[in-house]
Image (cartoon, coloured by chain):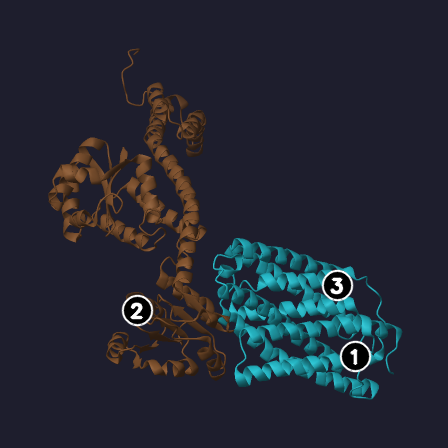
Chain colours: A brown, B cyan
Amino acid sequence: MNIVNIGINHKTAPVEIREQIAIDTERASRIFAFFKKTSSIRELFLLSTCNRVEIVFTTDSTELSRNAVVSLMCEMGKIPEPDLLPLTYTLQDMDAVRHIFRVASGLDSLVVGEPQILGQIKQAYLVSVQHRATGVILNRLLHRTFHVAKRVRSETGISESAVSISYAAVQLAKKIFHTLEDKSILLIGAGEMAELTARHLMANGIKSLSVANRTFDRALDIARQFGGDAISMEEIGYQLESGVDIVISSTASPGYIITADKVRPCLRKRRNRPLFLIDIAVPRDIDPEVNNISNVYVYDIDDLKGVVQFNMAQRQKEALKAERIVSEETIRFEKWLKTLDIVPTLVSLKQKAEDIVRTELKRSRHALGNLTPEQQASVETLVRSVTEKILNDPFLFLKRQSIRSDITTCLDFTRKLFNLDNEDNGET
Amino acid sequence: MSFILFHMALLCEILASGGFIVYIIKQKKWMFRVSYWLLFAGFVFHTGFLVYRFRILGTAPVLDMRSALSFFSWCVIAVYILFYLKFRMMVLGSFVAPFAAFMMLVSSSIPVKPVHIRPVFKSMWLTIHVSSVFLGIGLFTIACLVSIMYLIQEYHIKKKKYGSFYFSRLPSLATLDEINYCALIYGFPFLTIGIITGCIYAQCAFGTYWQWDPKEVFSLVTWLLYAALLHERLTVGWQGRKAAIMSIICFLVIMISFAGTSLFLGGYHSFSSMNIGRMPE
């Protein structure tokens, strides 16, 4: 029994191909239908996100099943097989297991440590379960996957820190204000980055926003998008006095719009409430001197980039820890998989012993004469405990050996030794 | 009995401090929980110790440096536990517990001397005076510690040192400032009540409300400083950095008046005079 993973992701294929290959609900039911017809594939799990398609299955004949799956993919995506094949990867057994663990932990993601993927895998697993496509191995594999992802999340800081400029701004704002619920933003000028930052801040609870722009019409326009108020550039000073908490500035102005001399007198009027100024413009809109005023914090684009870079490096460091967890869990899974191989042998060994006990008891009943039920029971217990004691050591031996690579030889030998496959060995 | 209680409290508090320090470095939540409950256990033993001493002495056990420090440590922990219940700020423990444990250590290193309890000490007013002053100081200690945390965090945000040890571990500036304010607003009435009941006690015991003893003078200065800080906060909205620096300065003045006058400047508040009887009768 092999675990096989055929996949295509953002590293191996461009988005045009990924779009064509992506599995929607309708395609998924086609694949599951195909799975039911194909006896060589025992269990199946499908995952399709915008960055990847992963097909995981267990099979006894790897080549056969793999070719069948690939040709189905090509047929559905309308891509000739020779074009698609070099863009996919095929992983087997422990490589496949490790891959799924890494994907779920966000180690294989475009942005390392991004958290959405785990939810997507859970969803995908649910679909596979609904189609009754998973069995002993994949159920165990997926549950271990959730466990690994959870461990990585809680034991490493891989998805803790912000790795985009706008999130970095949100994180800093939270370090200053703690909660953003009752705070207000002033957006000076417009620009994609500034608007994105404002949007993220609003998603974190800020309700009130005003927009100032050189052209008032544009200000009105943006204000409408955010559900805020438009103000003129001359009103900025008044806004600073009256208690705006966060200012995002990104104008094309060549000089400073906000200077220390302008901010300093405002502070007394705003009762020293902290002020967070985010300067996304180049050339800068806010005089760096402003940062020296107490309770006022200025971050320009380079500072924010610095935060992001630092956090990225931090995530890479945490990713190393995460890889260690993944390796640990892969080994653990491998061990489990191997005990699975010895289970049928142990079961038939037990069965054989039980059969012998039963026949021998039947045969001796006559010789033992009339026994009370208690005596009968104790004779049975006696015989059973003798066989159990005898089998105990072989069982322990097999369980110990189960993690070694020569287990198949051991199992084969055990089956021959106890004649578990009912072969005629020529003696009798 | 009191020996066992005292040393159990000391042991728990030292272990808790160690736990809290490991917690701030490793950031493991279970580490915090263990340390918190250790500190709580220490607090329970400590309370037991104080109640026991109170029953034996018949008055608040603060008549020598040893018991005063231990009572001070108890107040700081009490305030911390209350503040934890309100603000849920875990990292504060990493600052408070070592401070409290240090006070206990100093206290335990001072040899036990038999205290001569004169009838004048067995007054309700004295107990109220001492307890409320100490609780006030306990609150101000927290205010001082969060102010130090505030200054560290503010420095890191201002200087853009996002990668530093403290940046991710310390809470937001707003939270620290709020705790500072809360400690101040509750600490000030305690200090005020403490001084007033002290005057009443002085009147009952020595027949005079105020006698310009060094500790009285320092207390008055401290009270005025805190009053100024509170006033500025409430009227012009002093907050953040200035409020933090002011809290630290005020606390230093308290420490000088507490340790300095008790040990060096003399006066009837000093512990030595309590034993040898330089007190006005």
Point out the tag, 1 or 3, that comes first from the N-terminus. Answer: 3
The quarter of the displayed image where residue A167 is located = bottom left
Amino acid tagged 2: Glu
Nearest the eye: A276 or A374: A276
The residue mark sitting in front, 1 or 3, is 1
Crowd rating for badge 3 (residues with CA inside 10 Å; few <14, some 14–19, many 20+): many
Pointer 1: what residue?
B214
Residue at 42% over, 83% down: A242
Task: Determine whether B76 is above or below B19 in the image.
Answer: below
Pointer 3: what residue?
B107
Same chain letter for marks 1 and 3? yes
Q: Which mark is residue A195?
A: 2
State which quarter of the image contains the C terminus of chain B.
bottom right
- Cα–Cα span, label 2 and label 1: 61 Å
The residue mark sitting in front, 2 or 1, is 2
- Report in which chain the residue with disc 2 lies: A
- Judge left or right: residue A282 versus residue A125: right
Q: Is residue B131 visible?
A: yes
Same chain letter for marks 2 and 1? no
Amino acid tagged 1: Pro
- Report in which chain the residue with disc 3 lies: B
Residue B198 position within the rendered picture, expressed as x and y whole percent measured from the top left: 74, 83
Q: Secondary structure at mark 3?
A: helix
Amino acid tagged 3: Ser
Residue B118 position within the rendered picture, expressed as x and y whole percent measured from the top left: 85, 77
- Cα–Cα span, label 2 and label 3: 59 Å
Crowd rating for badge 2 (residues with CA inside 10 Å; few <14, some 14–19, many 20+): some
